[in-house]
Image: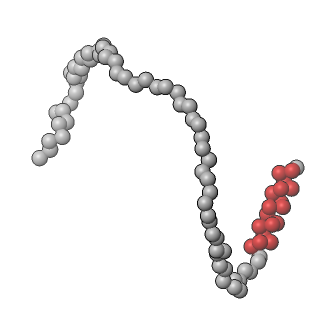
Amino acid sequence: MKKLIFTAAALSASLALAACDVDQTEEGEMPEVNVEGGNMPEYDVTTPEVEVGTEETTVEVPTVDITPAEDAAGEPATGDEE
């Protein structure tokens, strides 16, 4: 029920705003600002220690035996078309 009321209010507000005609009657101007001095905040940060290094590892890679199918038709694609 609250969603229905909120949706109806939002729709009626957007229709009311869409019916407005706004014309600028005077140019705007940015204010002049004078900034002097100041102090940046200081922080004391303690970071964790991180050790970075390398390690030699042996990885066993399986060998894969690929045999072409006996019933394959045509020639293998090589990408050298002339």
Does residue 57 appear in the picture of this structure? Answer: yes
Q: Position of residue 30 (x, y in %)?
A: 64, 75
Quick check: can you spot residue 74? no
Looking at the image, which residue is at 86% across and 56% down?
5
- Which of 66 and 5 lies nearest the eye of the viewer? 5
Residue 41 as seen in the image, left or right of residue 73? right
- Determine which quarter of the picture holds residue 45: top right
Task: Give residue 44's position: percent from left, percent from top.
Answer: 59, 37
Q: Position of residue 58 (x, y in %)?
A: 30, 14
Residue ranking furthest to the left: 82
Q: Which color scheme did the rendering employ for the protein? A: secondary structure
Q: Residue furthest front?
A: 37
Which residue: 86% across, 50% down? Answer: 2
Say which quarter of the image contains residue 11: bottom right
- Residue for point 76% across, 77% down: 20
**Number of numbered tags placed on the structure image:** 0
Q: Name the foreground residue: 38 vs 62.
A: 38
Location of residue 65 by image quarter: top left
Above or below 39: residue 69: above
Taking the image as shown, residue 10 lies to the left or right of residue 53, namely: right
Which of 40 and 53 lies nearest the eye of the viewer?
40
Residue sitting at x 80%, y 61%: 10
